[in-house]
Amino acid sequence: MSQHHHTFVDQYDGMVAFGFSREIDEKSLMYYLQKFSEDDLTKTLVPRLSNDEINEVFELVSRLMKKHLSDAEYHQYFLKDQAPHHHHE
C-alpha cells in the first residue's frame, strides 16, 4: 500500500482563491500543492525547469518544513518514518 496520498484535492469542493480569508487561502494552497505534485504534471514540468528553478523550489520547500515542522513531524509526515533517527557515537 502506498504511503503517500492526496485526498484533499479530490474531496474539497469549496472556493479555490487567494485573498478572501486565511481559511480559504490555506485550503486553496493545499489544493494547489496537491494538484502541483500530481505525477503527470511533475513529469511534464520538472524537466523544463532550469537548474536555478529546481534549486529555488527545493530550497523554499526545505526552508518551510525546517521552520514549521518539528523533527518528529518531518519524519512522520515527509519521510514517513515513525521517529527521527538518532546517531549514537
Image (cartoon, helix red, strand yellow):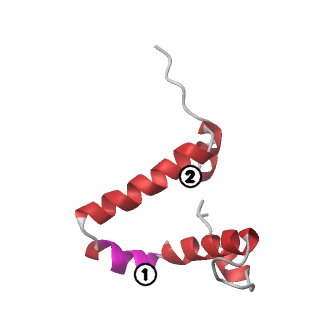
Residue 5 shown left or right of residue 36 in the figure: right
What is the count of numbered marks? 2
Instruction: Using a 10 Å C-alpha cutoff, classify the residue at mark 2 as few (fewer than 14 neighbours), some (14 to 19) or many (20 or more).
Output: few
**Magenta region includes residue 43:** yes
Q: Amino acid at mark 1?
A: Asp
Q: Look at 73% across and 80% down and name the residue there.
A: 11
User: Is the residue 1 above or below the residue 9 in the image?
Assistant: above
Q: Nearer the viewer, residue 24 or 13?
A: 24
Q: Look at 26% across and 61% down and name the residue there.
A: 52
Task: Locate residue 26, reporting x and y percent.
Answer: 68, 68
Q: Nearer the viewer, residue 75 or 1?
A: 75
Q: Amino acid at mark 2?
A: Phe
The residue tagged 1 is 40
Task: Locate residue 21, reporting x and y percent.
Answer: 73, 73
Q: Residue 3's image quarter?
A: bottom right
Instruction: Using a 10 Å C-alpha cutoff, classify the residue at mark 1 as few (fewer than 14 neighbours), some (14 to 19) or many (20 or more).
Output: few
Which residues lie in the magenta part? 39-46
